[in-house]
Amino acid sequence: MWHKREMVVHESDPYNAEPPRNRLLAPLTDADSFYVRNHGPVPELSPDTWSVAVTGLVSEPVTLSLGQLQARFAQHTVLATMQCAGNRRSGFLPVRDIPGEDPWGPGATSTARWTGVRLGDVLRAAGVHDAARHVEFAAPEVSQLADPPQPYGGSVPLGKALADEVLLAWGMNGAPLPPVHGGPVRVVVPGYVGARSVKWVRRITVRADPSENYFQATAYRVLAPEEDPDAAGPGDGISLGPVALNCDILSPEPDERVGTGPVLVRGYAHAGDDRRVARVDVSGDGGRTWCRADLDAAPSPWAWQHWRATVELAGPGPHTLLARAWDSTGACQPESAAALWNPKGYVNNSWARVPVNPAAAAD
Amino acid sequence: MWHKREMVVHESDPYNAEPPRNRLLAPLTDADSFYVRNHGPVPELSPDTWSVAVTGLVSEPVTLSLGQLQARFAQHTVLATMQCAGNRRSGFLPVRDIPGEDPWGPGATSTARWTGVRLGDVLRAAGVHDAARHVEFAAPEVSQLADPPQPYGGSVPLGKALADEVLLAWGMNGAPLPPVHGGPVRVVVPGYVGARSVKWVRRITVRADPSENYFQATAYRVLAPEEDPDAAGPGDGISLGPVALNCDILSPEPDERVGTGPVLVRGYAHAGDDRRVARVDVSGDGGRTWCRADLDAAPSPWAWQHWRATVELAGPGPHTLLARAWDSTGACQPESAAALWNPKGYVNNSWARVPVNPAAAAD
């Protein structure tokens, strides 16, 4: 009998949920635990009738069924981490109000093996024109979050679209891609914010410019603190693509009683796109001293890395455990979420902070 | 009559110098103002007798004179910023001692038009083997800074070496490349720390592994604060390649008296390699409020961007002007150099801080 495991459900319709921290300790996330960020209802699409149209700045526009995709192009599997631009949004809560009553924690990221064909192979077969610069993906489901309501969509630069790691995927961890994760077929853009890995993709349009879809042109953008998100229009703010360096602590849990002395701290780190995680530091004394974490090798160039460190907690506390990652440019995560606050609550990549050994309630 | 302009000279033998801030306000840096970071004496090489050997994991090793380079391969010009890994090292001074008595300020970066041939064209002509992963560059000049003393060298990953922007350059701003900047011919690796743009290159070796040269394996690495740089050996620390997001204020000058009211603040920002600068914020009140700078378009994908903002200074001060850049991932520079301090003083990419209106000395 199948048991749906516990998830942190942010919204039931459309379903939006993240796994609790301890479920992210595994190198791969099973489909039932994998975070879900949907902007509208899950469309009911049969693998037998689904097809995708490849159009725009190509020599031979084509519509391909799943069977044709599988017959005409080589199959590839890529192990890749997906991360929502709103991952760790709850870290902004101590700073200022942010949209949504129950913001995403550190579980708006997960990792799976994706199987499909290279988007680049499909595009090259269609013949990309010289004027092409971007590739747009369109889904069928209408989102009421968009203004005006419209199907979900987005785009990536042509160079990324042609890269070996970008797939049209029908498989997840060796099984058919579940509808809630974009089945029958979704785009998988490793290293980019999850918003560009469009689910249930039905149309791929090669363009000279980025997509004008609401979720590319207006949403998923970092506004300046003084900008009004309700007044923001197309082109305002920083458009998100490659994922920023980030990490979080997965164990202990926030407010867990771990006592004093040595405590094993575990977590994940992810550098995004072409960067790599080079080092992770952990502190048990509020940043006065740091120790270097034992960092796992990445299971693929496109995946997170897990790490662990044992820190000494002096006295009963309360204490705040800290973690920070460094990437292959020698850059470190910024210290404070306060400096990063933005109206839509994206890209909180400040140091991880997990309070432990809370003060006992007064008798 | 030619006048050598004022430079901040860190060392005269070998010559190491950076331009003062106001000379970085131009989009292009002239050769006399362009920073110089040399590890040994400038070798005397004639363009008529210079040659470079291409060897290692290639099908057809070859030695090419300058004339052969120019005759056999297409000429390309790339406008690119060069940045030393030690740029802004002086920002660590308030934190803790760092090596060298007169650390680099914000002028260990400069921008020029480089003319030469694509390294990738040369490598492809030589036939790169499937096992190749890195490309090593070796210079003739022996550095006493290396342990043991050895010619300067370094390497970049093969993918970068084959990229269109990487040149074997003999021209700088339309003139022959001066010897102090690597003439007759140097490597130019846009987006990477200057250390990889090896000057006076005489040998290019295609390899399976990164270079074992001291300046790749041991130097130019970010160590953890507790590591002893004198004891560090090959492979310790974070090896530097792509440049980290950075910015600095070029005007006003530190400790300049600018009065109260509106002050025009100008500077540069640079995101490195494949990232772009997306926004720059400036504050005149210690970070309580920020305004968005007017950001110039990048003169090329590989170059810095200049910016300007007018901030209000309330009262006589002293004040500290702040600036911080955001990149195309929505990430911001870290706030404090204290968190970034490392024994060799690399990659200070903390917020720019320039004090103005110093307190008058007591009568």
Image (spheres, coloured by chain):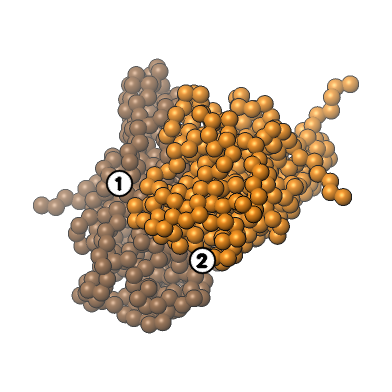
Chain colours: A brown, B orange
Give the class, few, some or many, for how many residues have Cα within 10 Å of label 2's Cα (few <14, many ≥20).
Answer: many
Give the residue drawn at x 66%, y 43%: B44
Which residue ends up furthest to the front in the rendered image?
Answer: B49
Element at label 2: helix
List x then y, in percent, for residue B277. 59, 54
Give the residue drawn at x 32%, y 66%: A118
Dot label at residue A217: 2
Q: Is residue B136 left or right of residue B246?
A: left
Which residue ends up furthest to the right in the rendered image?
Answer: B363
List x then y, in percent, for residue B300. 62, 60
Q: Is residue B231 left or right of residue B312?
A: left
Chain under disc 1? A
Give the mark nearer the N terminus: 2 vs 1: 2
The three-letter code of the residue at mark 2 reads Ala
Do badges 2 and 1 share one subunit?
yes
Can you identify the residue that label 1 sits on? A299
* Residue A115 quadrant: bottom left
Give the residue drawn at x 77%, y 43%: B252
The foreground one among B357 and B89 is B89
Task: Compute the Cα span from label 2 to label 1.
Answer: 33 Å
* Residue B361 quadrant: top right
